[in-house]
């Protein structure tokens, strides 16, 4: 039997967040859940939650996504760990974020569950204010998505979820992502100019 080691210093909690982009051939959307519990009850956030002790981050994000939205995906791409000291008012929390792209079908029904009150696909141009540091995580996810699209368009590499779309779709997706990122940069510059 192996020995279990414990340490006297505090441990941060680890969460996983799922950024799921949906594309219907025209519009790019983002899946969000309305939080049912504090902190940020009633606010919109990415599906996600605390990792369990017997699962990997990859398993945890797929489980949380399914529990909170009813959506099942095969795989997701890790975009990074987010560890700002005060990113979560509950305790010291490090979040590992993942993203994927799915084809939106007319008959795809979301089922909010666990601690999510609602699950909804939002157009990127109509996103509500996001809980925690999810706006920052979104920008990193979009930069990663943009890089993945460029590699695919250059014929260098293609992620599994991009392979379900045509090359014409990749171009349109790249345009949508670039347009949104330019708008966000412009809005941030306006806020800086206004002293916000």
Image (spheres, rainbow, N blue to C red):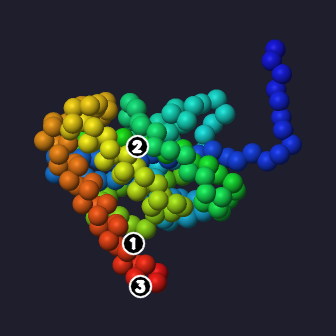
The residue most toward the left is: 168
Residue 41's image quarter? bottom right
Q: CA distance from mark 3 to mark 2?
A: 33 Å
Categorize mark 1 by other alpha carbons within 10 Å: few (<14), some (14-19), many (20+). Answer: few
Residue 138's image quarter? bottom left
Q: Please report the residue visible at 41 percent of the width from the left and 78 percent of the height from the top.
A: 191
Total numbered labels placed on residues in the image = 3
Residues at discs 1 and 3 in contact (Cβ within 8 Å):
no
Q: Please report the residue visible at 35 percent of the width from the left and 73 percent of the height from the top.
A: 187
Name the residue beneath numbered marker 3: 194
Name the residue beneath numbered marker 2: 99
Categorize mark 2 by other alpha carbons within 10 Å: few (<14), some (14-19), many (20+). Answer: many
Q: Please report the residue visible at 55 percent of the width from the left and 35 percent of the height from the top.
A: 57
Residue 105's image quarter? top left
Question: Looking at the image, is 150 positioned above or below residue 4?
Answer: below
Q: What kind of element bears circle 2?
A: strand
Categorize mark 3 by other alpha carbons within 10 Å: few (<14), some (14-19), many (20+). Answer: few
Name the residue beneath numbered marker 1: 188
Q: What kind of element bears circle 3?
A: loop
The residue most toward the top is: 1
Closer to the observer: label 1 or label 2?
Answer: 1
In the image, 30: left or right of 132?
Answer: left
Q: Position of residue 71 (x, y in %)?
A: 38, 40
User: Taking the image as drawn, is residue 105 in sight?
Assistant: no
Residues at discs 1 and 2 in contact (Cβ within 8 Å):
no
Question: Which quadrant does the N terminus fall into?
Answer: top right
Q: Position of residue 159 (x, y in %)?
A: 32, 32
Q: Position of residue 73 (x, y in %)?
A: 38, 34
Q: Of 136 and 73, which appears nearest the observer?
A: 136
The residue most toward the bottom is: 194
């Amino acid at each position: 039997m192996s020995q279990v080691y414990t340490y006297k210093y505090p441990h941060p909690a680890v969460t996983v967040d799922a950024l799921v982009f949906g594309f219907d051939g025209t519009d790019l959307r983002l899946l969000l859940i309305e939080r049912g519990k504090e902190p940020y009850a009633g606010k919109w956030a990415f599906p996600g939650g605390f990792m369990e002790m017997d699962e990997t981050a990859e398993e945890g994000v797929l489980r949380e996504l399914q529990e909170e939205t009813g959506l099942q995906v095969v795989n997701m791409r890790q975009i990074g760990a987010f560890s700002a000291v005060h990113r979560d008012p509950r305790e010291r929390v490090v979040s590992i974020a993942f993203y994927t792209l799915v084809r939106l079908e007319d008959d795809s029904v979301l089922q909010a569950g666990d601690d999510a009150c609602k699950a909804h696909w939002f157009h990127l141009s109509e996103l509500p204010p996001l809980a925690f540091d999810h706006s920052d995580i979104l920008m990193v996810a979009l930069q990663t998505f943009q890089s993945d699209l460029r590699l695919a368009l250059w014929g260098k590499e293609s992620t599994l979820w991009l392979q379900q779309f045509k090359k014409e779709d990749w171009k349109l997706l790249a345009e949508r992502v670039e347009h949104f990122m330019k708008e966000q940069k412009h809005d941030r510059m306006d806020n800086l100019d206004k002293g916000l």
